[in-house]
Image (cartoon, rainbow, N blue to C red):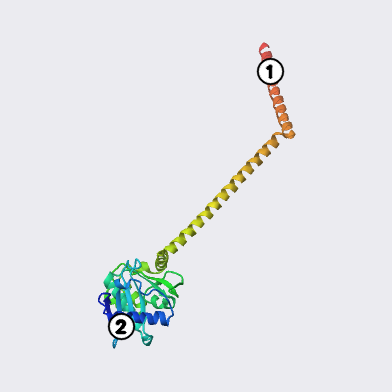
Amino acid sequence: MFTIKTYDELTKDELYKILQLRINVFVVEQETYYEDLDDHDQQALHLMHMVDNKLLAYARMLPPGEIFEEASFGRIITAPETRGTGLGKKMMKTIMHTIYTEWGNPPIFIQAQDYLTDFYHSFGFVPVSETYTYECLPHRDMLYSPLTEDLSNEGLNALSTGNSELSKKRERGNTNMAKFKGKGVVVAGLIAGAAGYLRKKENRDKVLDMVGMAKEKVTDFANTQKENLSNQKEAEAESLQDTAKAAAGSSDLKIEENEMVSEGAQTTVQYYNEKQDDKVQESDDKKE
């Protein structure tokens, strides 16, 4: 049903039909203006569906490192007369299988038109960006992250029935599948989302700017709190000093001190006199 060729294997007629379909759909039908000939066709694998010498479906697949670190695919087209027939799903099954067999089951990164997000999600792709305009149309970055364990061809064939069936196939053949369930799936999705977002330099620069601004705010806040605390300590110290000075200069305090000294002296003298009286009494007793 599908033919897959390298750029060098394409005939002139096939290349002409490919470019013709890409222009008819992307430029004429969708009214977009973009650089279609981007020097990546030469390294791509080209998927074609021909019927009676007419190209009805097309896609190109790119190896890891060609445009992104991950493998990728794009320029996916189905002719108007084939839409709604399930041809797109069959083409996706073939694309996923080809990438798996040709490049060893790598992660796959795509820039998907926004209205196709649910379609790609059914094949295991997760959105990793907000919607943005690319080539005149709304797009979202999406990432497919395969398990590290090998999948059988049987499991890949389940792609034609949608992602849920593929997930069941993975789970049956993978004893470590439990770690991808529940919260693990959420965490994995967040990590994949962050990695996909930071893949673009402009996003990395934006995050660094935000971190720098946050650092400045935290530093300013810390300095302000430190200054306030220092001022508070100084105020408390001055208040204590004022209180001490006021107490030291109080006439009441002096009166109390004089009374204490006077009372202490009287007590000492009384104690001495009592001792002297005791000694005199002892001496008189001895004489008798």
Disc 1 on helix, strand or loop? helix
The numbered disc on residue 276 is 1
What residue sits right under mark 2 in the picture? 49
Confirm or deny contact between disc 2 and disc 1 (CB under 8 A): no
Q: Earlier in the sequence, mark 2 or mark 1?
A: 2
Q: Position of residue 268 (x, y in %)?
A: 68, 24
Q: Position of residue 74 (x, y in %)?
A: 36, 75
Relative to 246, residue 212 above or below: below
Q: Nearer the viewer, residue 244 or 109?
A: 109
Look at 69% across and 15% down and name the residue there.
280
Q: Nearer the viewer, residue 73 or 7?
A: 7
The image quadrant where one finds the N terminus is: bottom left
The numbered disc on residue 241 is none
Look at 69% across and 34% down and name the residue there.
248
Seen as rendered, the residue at the extreme top is 287
- Asked whether residue 160 is in view, the answer is no
Crowding near pointer 2: few (<14 within 10 Å), some, many (20+)? some
Q: Position of residue 224 (x, y in %)?
A: 57, 50
49 relative to 139 in the view: left or right: left
Q: Position of residue 181 (x, y in %)?
A: 38, 69
Q: Amino acid at mark 1?
A: Gln
The image quadrant where one finds the C terminus is: top right
- Asked whether residue 102 is in view, the answer is yes
Q: Amino acid at mark 2?
A: His
Marks 2 and 1, how far apart in space? 132 Å
